[in-house]
Image: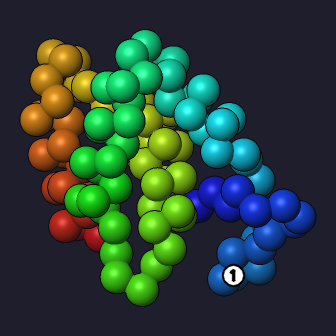
């Protein structure tokens, strides 16, 4: 989990987490998606699917952007629906 607020942060287990600004997360996600409008659309859809009750929406959005940075949300075929189905399957498994 990534925290965008300033200062050192620790998770529930006491481990330190890296702190990123949201702009850093966006630029990281742009490595796989060159169109900013499409990035916003995919991020908002994935955030709605992955959001858990009683958690901050900002944290869910940051998690989505980190996932987009690590792997292409478009999948191998460039199909948005396939990417969103994969995200929702990961959400159900958690």
In the image, 3: left or right of 82?
right
- For the point 26% across and 25% down, which residue is it? 74
User: Which residue appears at 34% of the width and 82% of the height?
Assistant: 53
Residue 40 is at least partly visible in this image: yes
**Badge 1: few (under 14), some or many (20 or more) residues near its Cα, within 10 Å?**
few
Which one is nearer the viewer's eye here, 1 or 7?
7
Residue 66's x, y, as percent? 52, 43
Q: Where is residue 50 in the image (x, y as percent from the top left)?
A: 30, 61
Vertical relation: 28 (above or below) 56: above
**Residue lying furthest right:** 7
- Locate residue 79, reporting x and y percent: 13, 23
Using residue 26 as the reference point, say whether residue 33 is left or right of it.
Answer: left
Q: Is mark 1 on a helix, strand or loop?
A: loop
- What residue is at 10 percent from the left and 35 percent from the top? 81
Please, is residue 51 above or below residue 42 in the view? below
Q: Which residue is drawn at 72% across and 46% down?
A: 21
When asked about the image quadrant of residue 32, the answer is top left
Examine the rendering and report whether any part of residue 72 can be seen: no
Vertical placement of 90 versus 92: above or below? above
Which image quarter is the N terminus in? bottom right
> Number of labelled discs?
1
Instruction: Give the quadrant of residue 40.
Output: top left
Specify the farthest residue to the front: 37
Kindly identify which residue carries mark 1: 13
State the image coordinates of residue 75 (x, y, percent, origin top left). Answer: 24, 25
Image height of 58 relative to 66, above or below = below
């Amino acid at each position: 989990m990534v925290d965008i607020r300033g200062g050192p942060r620790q998770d529930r287990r006491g481990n330190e987490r890296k702190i990123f600004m949201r702009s850093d997360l966006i630029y990281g996600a742009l490595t796989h998606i060159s169109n900013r409008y499409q990035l916003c659309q995919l991020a908002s859809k994935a955030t709605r699917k992955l959001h858990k009750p009683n958690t901050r929406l900002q944290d869910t959005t940051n998690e989505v952007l980190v996932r987009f940075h690590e792997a292409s949300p478009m999948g191998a075929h460039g199909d948005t629906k396939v990417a969103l189905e994969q995200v929702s399957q990961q959400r159900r498994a958690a």
